[in-house]
Image (cartoon, helix red, strand yellow):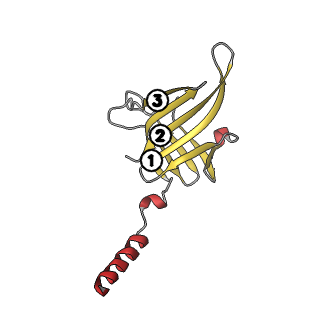
Amino acid sequence: MKKLLLLSSILLILFNSCSSDDENPNLLGKWYYYKRTEIINGQQEESLHTHECSTKKDYIEFLEGTFNNVIYNNLCNLDLNEAFTDNYIIDGSNLYLDVNEDDAIQITTLNNNTLILEANYEEVDSNGDMISGRTISEFKRN
């Protein structure tokens, strides 16, 4: 009985002392585009990301204080209309890019495999009407 109690205690200590990688996820590194959801006027449209280049995947990358958005065209060249580099800061679960310093992007999910960013926006449609929307972008490590 003492051996069983000792073994149970050791297993419990080992189980509790081993930390999962998901407990301390790291934003730094490359995150590949996976899925995008747009919500406009209560209507939701979801789509998987299509990588235009067959040999290179589009991704975002977080370095210390620098953000890269890397998009390739169908010729596998960097798409200069979509790709950009910017500075960023994180305040709690909010991410701020210099390009839109007043607009917070919410980090709603961050673990070793998945990053989900959500942002609200307002824009003028083709009729001149103001519309409000929400974008949910999902990224994967691989």
Position of residue 92 relative to residue 100, above or below, is below
Residue at x-position 50% and y-position 53%: 28
Distance, label 2 to label 1, CA atoms, is: 7 Å
Q: What amino acid is at disc 2? A: Glu
Q: Name the spot of residue 121 as percent of width and height, x first.
A: 64, 31
Residue that numbered label 2 is attached to? 138
Residue at x-position 47% and y-position 31%: 79
Q: Nearer the viewer, mark 2 or mark 3?
A: 3
Badge 3: residue crowd in 10 Å (few <14, some 14–19, many ≥20): few
Q: Name the spot of residue 72 as percent of width and height, x first.
A: 42, 33
Q: Name the spot of residue 131 as percent of width and height, x first.
A: 65, 23
Instruction: Label 1, secondary structure: give it.
Output: strand
Q: Quadrant of residue 47?
A: top left
| Pointer 2 with pointer 1, Cβ within 8 A | yes
Image quadrant holding the N terminus, namely bottom left
Q: Earlier in the sequence, mark 2 or mark 3?
A: 3
Residue that numbered label 3 is attached to? 46
| Pointer 2 with pointer 3, Cβ within 8 A | no
Position of residue 44 relative to residue 67, above or below, is above
Residue at x-position 61% and y-position 24%: 41
Q: Nearer the viewer, residue 37 or 60?
A: 37
Badge 2: residue crowd in 10 Å (few <14, some 14–19, many ≥20): many
Q: Name the spot of residue 36 as percent of width and height, x first.
A: 48, 33
Distance, label 1 to label 3, CA atoms, is: 17 Å
Q: Earlier in the sequence, mark 1 or mark 3?
A: 3
Residue that numbered label 1 is attached to? 114
- Determine whether, in the image, residue 30 is placed left or right of residue 38: left
Residue 134 bears which disc, if any? none
- Determine whether, in the image, residue 4 is placed left or right of residue 86: left
